[in-house]
């Protein structure tokens, strides 16, 4: 065997017809593992493997063959001392694959092996400590919320009624359904009763799970049963504990998003610190725990974090698959938990649509994201019993329109700059016209009328029209639908978030616009960016967050309620920017800095600036946080407690109550039937609320009696705070809106006056004279509430 191998290496040199040897080929066989440039080539793939043949074009002509006199005869043998060792045989020849592998293993430098191991170890340590910091921040925030909640409400010393009153804003009704599920004989029986509920809204049988999005209460009650927590923790503590745990997930997801974008978990810690400082503008969990937003927004935060990782170029296939699965699960859960969630995803879809239009993200990833959206919409539609809101959602219309436009514009991302701009304009036109047409056709097929109300509301909001409709004007006077006040921006500025946010956004937006110009000019995107490149706007995840914060920021400038969707990502995006070396390097490339090495300065500033910000925040806000936790506050409403105790003890279980939606949400927590609910997404419930609000209008006793009797009301609650409202903004008081809607307004010399032949009902009924005593009988009163029974038999006494 040694003789044959030696013959193969030394003797079988290809000959040419003229007797010359191809020395170039021979030299290639005998060359050292290093090429001319000095690079190590021992680990390069074999040019010829087993079973491969040399193409005819690469074969040596017969003219270059070796003369017979120079060849080694087959009968001749090479002495044993002159044989070539097996480990020196050329690795490029067939039949020596095992020897090649041995040679490659032996030739690996120990220094390289140690360096690769050290790099892997550094990454593992970095990821470990980053995840530990993220989880720690989330757990500390949950503990902080629990402690602050106890200090603010004295929750552990309160009675059950008083605890339920702490769930403000009408959110107590959600807690009632959680109690109902725990009191049911079985989980299945509880779900069955809620899906055929005739004890919530008078005169109606509704699917409470679908109408009120009660999936959080169903899952929480099931967990309480399965974990055998009955002997360990009270139901109310388990309920609020789950909500606070979701808030921990919320801030952890913000931490991870900032960490993934900046490359350092210091950015995540800074994002969490800013979020906690600005929590009054970032969450409602402190005073309205059962609100749907507090259950849904943590899932949206996880979805954004997964989307951030999925869009990143520097991600392995396994991590990409994990992000894809997490994004799928959280998108579906977000749609199932919160009814307006598809509007939020529509805004997110617009940001992704811009990325796709300007060719800033691979086509494969956009196709996967569309699959996530469509599958989540389909599953949520099936879970919510074919709810038409998802079919008529703008998100579905946008997805269908973008897919159709892409099919008809296959060459949109090709051509010179001007041609591509024209194609993009045509693409925008096709997508939005198709989406509007598709949405209109679906609504006509399904006979949906709520779009008219939404359009009317938006017209009045933006000053394109005026309306005397009570519901429209009532919604426009809600704090969530007003423009943000100056105090909101002052709070963000005082916490140093807003100034740094504007600087980071300016740099990222300018770099993004530059990237878009290069892409439209035909330049490819650089996938493996280096720090010295200084191109923060070429990272797809950064571009997405630029569009994300711009779109949600624009909406937050119009509707203050959307600040709860914008402020958390302002904190996250700002923390990423000040901690990102790539952002500082982008600025230095624009400034053409030469006095100091820009890479070194970028690394220094990306560490020094967040450190200085962190110490300043620690010095100013940490004592405030400790003071909040140590200060014993008091939240007590004795009049409301007295009312609820009277209702539970004196009112029949079959009674029906009418009143303001927020108060009825609290009454519903007692298990009684109500005429309406504090649900502003249901137009029919809003119209029922308008009938109950007529007790504060200038209407006759007979008119009010007919309106209340139409909804089978047994009792009506009149609130002194609404009847004698002294708000400085006259136009937004409930009684003013009712007068305006009922036509009881007279203008004289630019002043508005209320006039009617009937007095204001809530004032007149307290006089206790006919005809009010004919229709109503007072059964309870205190300083804040008056309860009147709606007489089933009218007694005419004068």
Image: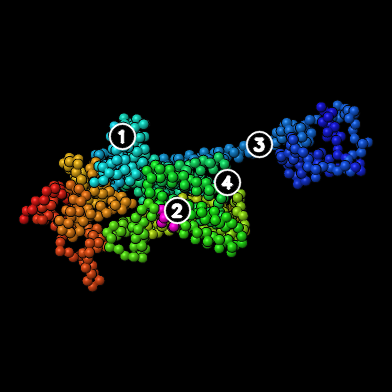
Placement of 2 over or under 379, stated as above or below: above
Residue 92, percent across and down?
A: 76, 37
For residue 484, what is the image quadrant?
A: bottom left
Measure how far apart labels 3 and 2 are at the Cα level: 54 Å
Give the residue number, with chain letter if any, for mark 4. 314
Measure how far apart labels 2 and 1 are at the Cα level: 38 Å
For residue 650, what is the image quadrant?
A: top left
Give the residue number, with chain letter if any, for mark 1. 189
Contact, CB < 8 Å: mark 3 with mark 4?
Answer: no
Measure how far apart labels 3 and 4 are at the Cα level: 23 Å
Outermost bottom residue: 749
Q: Which mark is residue 714?
A: none
Q: Give the mark nearer the N terminus: 2 vs 1.
A: 1
SS label for mark 3: helix
Give the residue number, with chain letter if any, for mark 3. 113
The C terminus: image quadrant: bottom left
Considering the whole magenta stretch, tell me its main secondary structure. helix
Residue 636, percent across and down?
A: 24, 46
Nearer to us of marks 2 and 4 is 2
Q: Give the mark nearer the N terminus: 3 vs 1.
A: 3
For residue 236, what is the image quadrant?
A: top left
Q: Can residue 138 be seen at all in this image of the molecule?
A: yes
Q: Which mark is residue 397?
A: 2
Residue 660, percent across and down?
A: 24, 51
Residue under the point 17% across and 59% down: 699
Tell me, yes or no, whether the highlighted magenta stretch contains residue 476.
Answer: no
Measure how far apart labels 3 and 1 are at the Cα level: 63 Å
């Amino acid at each position: 065997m040694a003789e044959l191998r030696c013959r193969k290496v030394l003797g079988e040199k290809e000959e040419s017809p003229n007797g010359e040897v191809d020395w170039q080929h021979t030299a290639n066989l005998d060359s050292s593992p290093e090429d001319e440039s000095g690079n190590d080539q021992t680990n390069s793939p074999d040019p010829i493997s087993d079973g491969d043949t040399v193409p005819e074009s690469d074969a040596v002509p017969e003219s270059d063959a070796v003369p017979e006199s120079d060849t080694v005869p087959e009968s001749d043998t090479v002495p044993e001392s002159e044989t070539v060792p097996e480990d020196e045989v050329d690795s490029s020849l067939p039949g020596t694959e095992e020897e090649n592998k041995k040679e490659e293993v032996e030739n690996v430098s120990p220094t390289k092996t140690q360096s690769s191991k050290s790099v892997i170890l550094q990454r593992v340590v970095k990821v470990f400590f980053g995840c530990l910091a993220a989880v720690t921040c989330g757990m500390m925030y949950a503990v902080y919320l629990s402690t602050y909640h106890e200090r603010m409400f004295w929750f552990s010393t309160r009675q059950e009624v008083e605890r339920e009153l702490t769930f403000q804003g009408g959110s107590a009704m959600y807690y009632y359904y959680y109690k109902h599920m725990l009191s049911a004989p079985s989980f299945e029986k509880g779900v069955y009763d809620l899906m055929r509920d005739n004890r919530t809204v008078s005169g109606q049988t509704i699917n409470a799970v679908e109408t009120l999005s009660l999936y959080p209460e169903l899952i929480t009650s099931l967990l309480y049963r399965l974990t055998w927590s009955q002997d360990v923790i009270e139901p109310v503590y388990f309920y609020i504990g789950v909500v606070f745990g979701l808030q921990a997930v919320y801030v952890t997801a913000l931490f991870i998003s900032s960490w993934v974008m900046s490359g350092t978990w210091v950015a995540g810690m800074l994002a969490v610190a800013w979020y906690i400082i600005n929590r009054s503008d970032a969450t409602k969990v402190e005073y309205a725990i059962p609100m749907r937003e507090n259950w849904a927004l943590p899932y949206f935060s996880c979805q954004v974090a997964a989307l951030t990782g999925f869009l990143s170029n520097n991600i392995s296939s396994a991590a990409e698959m994990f992000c894809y699965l997490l994004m799928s699960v959280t998108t579906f859960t977000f749609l199932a938990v919160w009814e307006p969630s598809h509007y939020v995803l529509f805004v997110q879809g617009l940001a992704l649509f811009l990325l796709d239009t300007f060719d800033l993200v691979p086509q494969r990833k956009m196709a996967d994201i569309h699959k996530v959206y469509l599958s989540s919409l389909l599953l949520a539609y099936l879970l919510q019993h074919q709810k038409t809101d998802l079919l008529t959602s703008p998100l579905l219309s946008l997805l269908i329109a973008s897919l159709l436009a892409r099919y008809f514009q296959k060459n949109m991302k090709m051509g010179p700059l001007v041609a591509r701009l024209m194609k993009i304009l045509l693409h925008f036109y096709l997508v939005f016209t198709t989406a509007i047409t598709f949405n209109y056709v679906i609504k006509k097929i399904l006979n949906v009328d709520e779009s008219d109300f939404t359009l009317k509301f938006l017209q009045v909001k933006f000053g394109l029209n005026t309306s005397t409709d009570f519901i429209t004007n009532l919604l426009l006077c809600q704090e969530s639908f007003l423009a943000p006040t100056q105090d909101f921006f002052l709070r963000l500025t005082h916490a140093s978030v807003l100034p740094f946010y504007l600087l980071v956004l300016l740099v990222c937006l300018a770099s993004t616009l530059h990237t878009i110009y290069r892409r439209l000019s035909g330049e490819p995107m650089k996938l493996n960016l280096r720090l010295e490149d200084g191109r923060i706007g070429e990272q797809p995840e950064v571009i997405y967050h630029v569009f994300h914060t711009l779109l949600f920021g624009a909406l937050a400038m119009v509707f203050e309620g959307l600040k709860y969707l914008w402020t958390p990502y302002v904190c996250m995006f700002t923390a990423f920017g000040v901690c990102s070396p790539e952002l500082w390097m982008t600025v230095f490339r624009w400034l053409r800095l030469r006095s100091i090495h820009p890479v070194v300065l970028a690394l220094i500033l990306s560490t020094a600036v967040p450190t200085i910000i962190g110490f300043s925040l620690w010095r100013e806000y940490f004592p405030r946080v400790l003071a909040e936790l140590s200060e014993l506050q008091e939240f007590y409403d004795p009049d409301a407690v007295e009312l609820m105790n009277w209702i539970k003890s004196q009112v029949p279980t079959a009674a029906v109550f009418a009143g303001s939606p927020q108060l009825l949400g609290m009454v519903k927590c007692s298990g009684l039937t109500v005429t309406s609910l504090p649900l502003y997404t249901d137009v029919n419930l809003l119209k029922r609320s308008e009938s109950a609000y007529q007790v504060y209008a200038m209407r006759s006793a007979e008119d009010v009696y007919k309106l209340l009797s139409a909804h089978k009301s047994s009792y009506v609650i009149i609130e002194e705070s609404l009847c004698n409202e002294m708000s400085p903004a006259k136009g937004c008081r409930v009684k003013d809106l009712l007068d305006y809607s009922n036509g009881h307004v007279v203008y004289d010399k630019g002043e508005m006056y209320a006039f009617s032949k009937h007095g204001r009902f809530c004032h007149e009924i307290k006089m206790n004279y006919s005809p009010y005593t004919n229709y109503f009988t007072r059964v309870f009163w205190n300083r804040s509430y008056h309860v009147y029974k709606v007489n089933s038999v009218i007694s005419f006494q004068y």
